Image: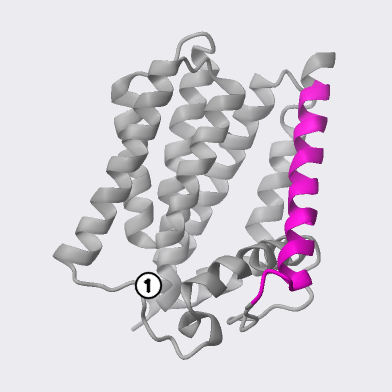
Amino acid sequence: NPAGYRLLQIVVHALNVLLVFFFVKSIRTQANEPNRDVVPLLATLFYAIHPVNVESVTYIAAVGEILYTMFGLLGLLGLARHTERSPDRPASLRQMAIFFALILLSMLAKESGVVFLFMGGAYLGLFSIMRARQWRYYVTGSVITLLAYLWLRLVISNIPFLIDYNSSISNAPIASRLLTIPYAMTHYIITLIAPIRLVVYENTVVASPGDFLFWGLTLMVLAVIAGAAFWYHRTRSKT
């Protein structure tokens, strides 16, 4: 009877919706932005009903998607709440340890949870007072988290990284996988903005650095990131 599994995924997705709201609201509060509830509400509605989340909520086998999101958002929200309460005080070792424990759980649910390590570092760099010692703590904690994940996966569970999922990208060499990252990022961004071509498996593989899908999309992604950073710092300087 799949009813219990489906109910679990709906409940976890609803929890993730709430976590998105509180995390975005915390960012708006720290940035001293007006209409602090409007943007978080819009972001939450966007996340809650976006078609890209259909697979993770309705496919029982995709439970790892919502679990890694839940643990990652819990870790980010913990950092956000500390920074919101004490903007002039860096996170303590205890708070860092809780964050890395949640990120480890996120990675154990799905290896994509590693992205929350970069998101946490970016968040602390933008909104928290991070001295050299705190950055050493963060880098050390990130390395320990990655090593713990590798130990649990490769040694304890004996789960290899190269698993044949009968798709082009899973059978591609590591160099081609890395070259395909800009295309994958662009594909996800376009899907978020215009969810027209929804697919379960994306079989496009970039094999050469000279392919426009690598260098062209890399420049586009960097331009978007640079534009967002410029807009953010310009907004902060006005406030």
**Residue found at the very far bottom of the displayed protein:** 166
| Left-right relation of 163 to 69 | left
| Left-right relation of 113 to 220 | left
Foreground residue among 75 and 215: 215
Q: Is residue 32 above or below residue 164?
A: above
Foreground residue among 156 and 82: 156
Check residue 224 for magenta coloring: yes
The image quadrant where one finds the N terminus is bottom left
Identify the residue under disc 1: 5
Residue at image position (81%, 66%) is 194
* Mark 1: amino acid: Tyr
Secondary structure category for the residue under label 1: helix
What is the x, y in percent for residue 213?
A: 74, 71
Question: Disc count in the image?
Answer: 1
Magenta range is 208-235
**Residue found at the very far left of the displayed protein:** 156
| Left-right relation of 57 to 207 | left
Whether residue 73 appears in this view of the structure is: no
Whether residue 183 appears in this view of the structure is: yes
Q: In this view, does 26 lie above or below 66?
A: above
State the predominant SS element of the stretch in magenta.
helix
Q: Quadrant of residue 168?
A: bottom right
Q: Is residue 121 above or below residue 116?
A: above
Foreground residue among 96 and 130: 130
Q: Quadrant of residue 177?
A: bottom right
